[in-house]
């Protein structure tokens, strides 16, 4: 059976949810009908536009730009700060409602998810009719709107949901790619960041269709493995498996939001060092080793990306997790500023489970020898007794920070997954 995948995306989620809450409390004006934005404190790093109304968009205001710029474009702009606790509750309510249709839901952010509609398609005359019932039900029940993209894989469903907004349903089946997707500017392609777009335009690739028809070897020459991924996306090649079981139920992970966006590999590596140390310690505490490592990125404009690799030999060693995460990062990083990094592990096995040797072991990060294993065990014991970070390797000590970064504790804010 051909898969039928929905991508469901809340229209201007933060602003819509704020507007709905205000109207519920008696507000006379709907923020969605005036020039309005959700933005952070202009004095902090979060002083960017997180969401905008259609009226604000007409002034040229873009998500991710500094709030100060937005006010220069529209002096009468109305701004409210984000309320992440309220957003999480709205998101929880939305996902609970969607699961009344099917449990095959993969939530990818607070305001968007994929739904595998295949198993319930026979209840409706068409996928569009089913999407219409879902879309209209959300609007009637919660007061905000969504876009729903429909296709045979997640990539095309995601692209379809980004077509005309708000409160719309769009299809993008493989046979519609040439007509609906190829004429779009290359910057509209999923995962085509600014630096990638600049490279592609220098190659006279200006539309998604131009990229789809290009020689993939040429693209890889300039953009490496990320170029191959973009070429596949331009041709509609993407995963069609909706992962409905949360990663957290199957593995151990940790992520961190940076106080300042990381723009270089040198800034990223120490972050992965600390994350790998934390994840490795949690795996050891649970008596587990990981067979799969995945790395996640959230860019400055809130786009997310992830990449994973199966280890030839299950491990809980921080050095193995660190080197794998760095390798995965370099494979897909677009070169754009990063605001969040994460390491997740899955395919867990007991640490004393028998291991099958592989000829690929020599290509993977090496397990430590017995001397280093004893040293690591002693460090782990001290950290368990006196707190995480009581003893760390000298190589993991942060370089001498600037004065302001010292005051902010090296700029890292931790979050357990």
Image (tube, grey):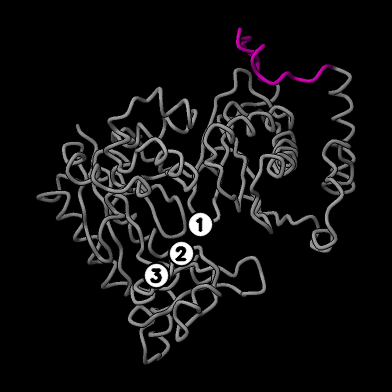
Q: Secondary structure at mark 1?
A: loop
From the viewer's perspective, is 77 left or right of 262? left
Judge from the rendering whether residue 125 lies leftward or rightward of residue 252; answer left or right. left
Nearer the observer: mark 3 or 1; the answer is: 3
Residue located beneath label 1 in the image: 301
Q: Which residues are magenta?
A: 353-369
Q: Earlier in the sequence, mark 2 or mark 1?
A: 2
Label 2 with label 1: CB-CB less than 8 Å: yes
Does residue 98 lie above or below 390 as drawn? below
Q: Are marks 3 and 1 in contact (CB under 8 Å)?
A: no
Q: How many marks?
A: 3
For residue 4, above or below residue 164: above
Question: Residue, x 55% and y 55% (percent of image)?
Answer: 300
Compute the Cα span from label 3 to label 1.
Answer: 16 Å
Task: Return the x and y of residue 225 as percentages of the image width and height.
Answer: 48, 28
In percent of width and height, residue 30 lies at 36, 84
Q: Which residue is mark 3?
A: 60
- Which comes before the other along the chain, label 3 or label 1? 3
């Amino acid at each position: 059976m051909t898969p039928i995948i929905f991508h469901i995306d809340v229209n201007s989620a933060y602003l819509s949810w704020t507007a709905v809450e205000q109207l519920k409390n008696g507000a006379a004006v709907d923020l969605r009908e005036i020039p309005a934005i959700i933005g952070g404190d202009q004095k902090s790093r979060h002083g960017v536009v997180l969401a905008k109304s259609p009226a604000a968009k007409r002034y040229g205001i873009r998500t991710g730009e500094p709030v100060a710029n937005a006010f220069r474009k529209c002096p009468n702009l109305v701004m409210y700060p984000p309320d992440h606790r309220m957003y999480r509750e709205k998101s929880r309510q939305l996902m609970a409602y969607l699961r009344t249709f099917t449990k095959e839901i993969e939530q990818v952010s607070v305001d968007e998810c994929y739904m595998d509609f295949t198993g319930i398609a026979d209840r409706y005359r068409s996928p569009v009719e089913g999407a219409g019932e879902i879309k209209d039900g959300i609007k009637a029940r919660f007061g905000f709107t969504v876009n729903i993209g429909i296709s045979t894989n997640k990539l095309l469903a995601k692209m379809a949901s980004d077509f005309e907004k708000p409160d719309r349903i769009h299809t993008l089946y493989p046979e519609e790619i040439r007509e609906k997707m190829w004429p779009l500017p290359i910057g509209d392609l999923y995962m085509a960041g600014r630096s990638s777009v600049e490279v592609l335009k220098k190659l006279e690739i200006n539309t998604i269709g131009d990229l789809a028809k290009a020689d993939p070897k040429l693209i890889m020459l300039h953009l490496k493995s990320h170029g191959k991924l973009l070429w596949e996306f331009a041709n509609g090649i993407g995963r069609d498996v909706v992962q409905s079981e949360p990663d957290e139920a199957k593995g151990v992970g940790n992520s961190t939001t940076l106080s300042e966006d990381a723009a270089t590999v040198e800034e990223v590596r120490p972050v992965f060092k600390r994350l790998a140390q934390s994840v490795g310690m949690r795996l050891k505490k649970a008596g587990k080793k990981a067979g799969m490592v995945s790395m996640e990125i959230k860019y400055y404009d809130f786009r997310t990306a992830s990449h994973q690799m199966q280890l030839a030999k299950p491990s809980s060693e921080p050095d193995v997790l660190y080197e794998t995460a760095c390798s995965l990062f370099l494979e897909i990083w677009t070169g754009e500023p990063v605001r969040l990094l994460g390491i997740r592990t899955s395919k867990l096995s007991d640490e004393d489970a028998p291991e099958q040797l592989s000829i690929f072991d020599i290509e993977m990060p090496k397990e430590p020898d017995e001397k280093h294993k004893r040293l690591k065990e002693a460090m782990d014991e001290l950290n368990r007794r006196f707190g995480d970070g009581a003893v760390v390797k000298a190589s993991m000590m942060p370089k001498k920070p600037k004065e302001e970064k010292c005051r902010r504790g090296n700029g890292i804010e931790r979050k357990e997954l």
